Amino acid sequence: MAEPISSPEYLKNQAEAFREALLSSDEENARLIFEEAKDQYSPLELVETIVVPALDDIGTGWANNQYALSQVYMSGRICENVVDAILPPESGMRKARPKMAIALLNDYHALGKRIVYATLRAGGYQVRDYGRVEADELVERVIDDELDLVLISVLMLTSAMNVKEVSRELRKRGATVKIAVGGAPFRLDPHLWQVVEADVAGVTASDALSIANDVAEGLSL
């Protein structure tokens, strides 16, 4: 017998079905799963109980070599499309705190940044996309936008080392923004984020979502 639509087991089953739809790049089915439940749950409830668990599982699976990078990428894109349909970018229901942005620092390999951006938006957050920036431009934009969190993506070690310049200049100018870093150099060296004076590092896109949630919780205390 099918579980009642209001039961926790129903949501668990829907999250699993949604995950399978993502892994199969089946955007139509992913949308249908949302359509079935949207009258019973708010958009943010659907995001937090269906989208986030599915993305978290896929991110963990990729880190454990269970899924291909292409599956992670397509999952993020599909989630972004599905969530945008119920939480448009201008929607007042999107979570505006922490005020955050994501940037590619002195690098040209944008795939990792794109995946993280899609995951954060699929998680219901408003996120500024700064694109590719140099260190001095990033500092100015972070200060001008009064960010609570900046996520910096890099692929090359030389780019990763530039994070220290950003961090020191932001602290020098009194910014209290949290600096999160991610990318290949930080996966290869688990202590590099401390060397470049960031606040935290993420390995997967779902890590970025956890970081945003932690910063949001800290702001609410």
Image (tube, helix red, strand yellow):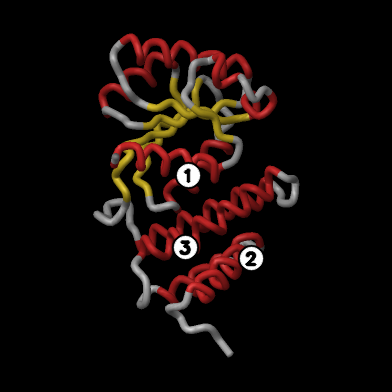
Choose the circle earlier in sequence order: 1 or 2: 2
Give the percent coordinates (x, y) of residue 195. Answer: 56, 14
Label 1 sits on what residue type?
Answer: Leu
Whole-Å distance between the Cαs marked 3 and 1? Answer: 14 Å
SS at circle 1: helix
Choose the circle earlier in sequence order: 2 or 3: 2
Q: Residues within 10 Å of mark 2 (few under 14, many from 20)?
A: some
Quadrant where the C terminus is found in the figure: top left
SS at circle 3: helix
Give the percent coordinates (x, y) of residue 22. Answer: 60, 61
Quadrant where the N terminus is found in the figure: bottom right
Q: Are marks 3 and 1 in contact (CB under 8 Å)?
A: no
Label 2 sits on what residue type?
Answer: Glu
Residue at the right extreme of this rendering: 65
Give the percent coordinates (x, y) of residue 68. Answer: 71, 49
Q: Are marks 1 and 2 in contact (CB under 8 Å)?
A: no
Of badges 1 and 2, nearer the viewer stands 1
According to the picture, the residue beneath numbered tag 1 turns out to be: 209
Q: Residues within 10 Å of mark 3 (few under 14, many from 20)?
A: some
Label 3 sits on what residue type?
Answer: Thr
Kindly identify the residue that appears in the image at 47 percent across and 27 percent down: 132
Give the percent coordinates (x, y) of residue 88. Answer: 33, 57
Which circle marks residue 40 in the picture?
none
Q: Quadrant of residue 108?
A: top right
SS at circle 2: helix
According to the picture, the residue beneath numbered tag 3 turns out to be: 49
Q: Is residue 193 above or below residue 6?
A: above
- Front one among 98 and 143: 98
According to the picture, the residue beneath numbered tag 2 turns out to be: 20
Q: Is residue 150 above or below residue 18?
A: above
